[in-house]
Image: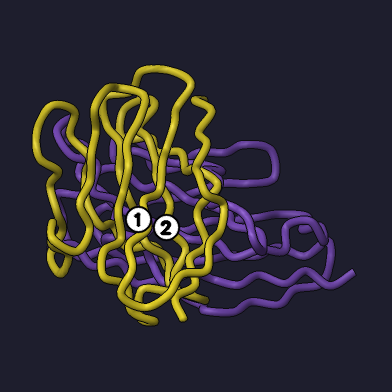
Amino acid sequence: GENVEQHPSTLSVQEGDSAVIKCTYSDSASNYFPWYKQELGKRPQLIIDIRSNVGEKKDQRIAVTLNKTAKHFSLHITETQPEDSAVYFCAASIESGSQGNLIFGKGTKLSVKP
Amino acid sequence: SAVISQKPSRDICQRGTSLTIQCQVDSQVTMMFWYRQQPGQSLTLIATANQGSEATYESGFVIDKFPISRPNLTFSTLTVSNMSPEDSSIYLCSVEDGPNTQYFGPGTRLTVL
């Protein structure tokens, strides 16, 4: 089955710096890759996703890149702010229309220091 | 995106008892899922709640321990049966609103004594 590895497990940056979180997956059939942000005591929130027919997607300060050959994808946050502090989870699934089995990475705790 | 609510938001239960968690969505959705998030850990899919048929369970989860109902396209329940302290977790439902795009409910924080 699919296995998703996520690195680093913790990341500390200064406000204004960039943060990069990387994930690798094992199943070459996976074609949908979402990222979730979970603040303490709250639900995971979908912040951005990418499908295998594109290599990069941006939404303001957030971008995700995908390398299908190498089976890895990354989250990039630019100009980090203290409110970006949270746990970020990557996930992978096969977009089959029958079951949406999201397999999650173990998470990255991002701390942005003012 | 769909608005998802869960009841209860938290509960403290005694060992050996059962708790039923409800998940309500404000619109009809085809796919609903139940996840478990143990303290400080990632999310693990328990099962897919199928409307009109038995839920589809992931490896390591069984119907006798986690019975699921899905009576219609806006509602599902997850029961945690014969609880032990190891069942202490956050239980989250999610719905698919768009191709493979899942949104999560607020979660139910369960503590088993």
- What is the drawing colour of chain B? yellow
**Can you tell which of label 2 and label 1 is closer to the viewer?**
2
What secondary structure is found at the residue carrying circle 1? strand
Provide the chain ID for the residue under circle 1: B
Q: Which residue is mark 1?
A: B35
Placement of A43 over or under B40, stated as above or below: above
A4 on left or right of B60: right
- Residue drawn at x 66%, y 64% is A40
- Residue drawn at x 71%, y 77% is A12
The crowding category of the residue bearing disc 1, from other C-alpha atoms within 10 Å (few below 14, some 14 to 19, many at least 20), is many
Q: Position of residue B78 (x, y in %)?
A: 31, 49
Residue B94: quadrant of the picture: top left
Dot 2 and dot 1 residues touching (CB under 8 Å) = yes
Q: Which residue is mark 2?
A: B91
The crowding category of the residue bearing disc 2, from other C-alpha atoms within 10 Å (few below 14, some 14 to 19, many at least 20), is many
**In terms of depth relative to the viewer, which is nearer, A33 or B32?**
B32
Provide the chain ID for the residue under circle 2: B
**In terms of depth relative to the viewer, which is nearer, A25 or B44?**
B44
- What is the drawing colour of chain A? purple
Residue type, mark 1 in image = Tyr
What secondary structure is found at the residue carrying circle 2? strand
A15 on left or right of A52: right
Q: Position of residue A90 (x, y in %)?
A: 43, 58
